[in-house]
Image (spheres, grey):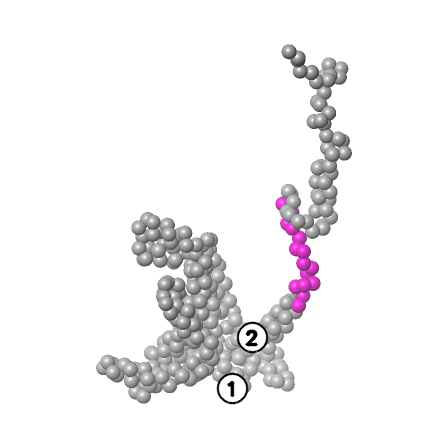
Amino acid sequence: MTRPKSAPTEGGRRVAPAARTAPAHRRGGGRGRARRRGSENESGAPTARTGRGGRRRRSPYSYALYLPAAIVYGVIFFVPTVMAFYFALTRWTLFDSTFVGLQNFRDFFGEQNLRIGLQNTLIFGVVTSGLKVVLGLLLAVLLTSRLRLRGFLRSAVFFPVLVSTVAVGITFSVLLKPDVGLVDKALGLVGISGPDWLGGASTALLSVALVDVWRGVGLATVIYIAGILSIPPQYYEAVSVDGGTAWDRFRHVTLPLSWPATYSVIILSFIGGLRSFDLIWTMTRGGPGFTSDVIASIIFKQYQAGFYGLATAGNVILFIVVTAIVVPLVWFLGKKQVAL
């Protein structure tokens, strides 16, 4: 029986077989490549992945590619905003201007109907955004169910969004006329006498708000449909396996996981409500009296009277009010985002 050959020794030490010994130029290759990659990262060249030291991968695009968008943003938004802040401190016309400091702001805050306008602005924003969230979610749940005319109903719900706001205002002004309007005639068939929808101090603003909801709920519904369709169906299957009802699926799956859509609808609707002007002006012109005036309509009346500096100061105040309300709201709602 032959004995296996022992490994060669050198000075009493056992030497590894030659087959297991890598050449010197190969042994240092990995470390050399790592050093080269490290030097490339340190030199600032773009790399394919993030380094071990936590270095961020540089963008493969040059900053010059962002320049056209920055120019458009600056010309359309930034420059006019800065000019508005300046002209709010002046009395100006198309040909000259006189610096008056904060006098325009003092005069605007001295407007007799400013308190009513601010109150109506907040009421209009809260009512319209709240109703759009509720109705948009309910319509989205209905239009994502198994309906035969689902596509047609989605188009019908979204159609008012495409109609001009002025056209909507004129149409509903005719429909809501007392006694002769279609709404009052329909109520008369069931023995109900409708109020003066646009001529009553207590109903004018609410009537315009409901028309605004009718026109804008289609966009909220589309946003909700996109949010609901992005929910994985496995969640609904899990609820069904556990014996859950349709209410359980809505409460425990649809409602919490559609929060990103709710977040978008609240922000967009509330900003639109605070800035609303064209529908209110078309239907009531701020009347009767000042009962349906909002900040935007007060500003427009100053422009009509030729007080351009005063109206510009009102625009700056409206910008500050909207920013002061929306920024904390965005922060608060952003904390409630649900990650799918």
| Mark 2 or mark 1: whose residue is earlier in sequence | 2
**Residue 93 location (% of width, % of height):** 60, 84
- Queried whether the magenta region covers residue 73, the answer comes back as no
SS at circle 1: loop
**Which label was assigned to residue 332?**
none
Please report the residue visible at 75 percent of the width from the left and 17 percent of the height from the top: 10
- Residue 144: image quadrant is bottom left
* Left or right of residue 247: residue 274: right
The residue singled out by tag 1 in the image is 305
Please report the residue visible at 43 percent of the width from the left and 54 percent of the height from the top: 232
Distance between mark 2 and mark 1 Cα atoms: 20 Å
Give the dominant element type of the magenta stretch: helix, strand or loop.
loop
In front of the other: 133 or 150: 150
Magenta highlight range: 54-68
Q: Quadrant of the N terminus?
A: top right
Q: Residues within 10 Å of mark 2 (few under 14, many from 20)?
A: few
- Residue 119: image quadrant is bottom left
The residue singled out by tag 2 in the image is 102
**Residue 125 location (% of width, % of height):** 42, 71
Mark 2 and mark 1 residues within 8 Å of each other at the beta carbon: no
Farthest-out residue, top: 1
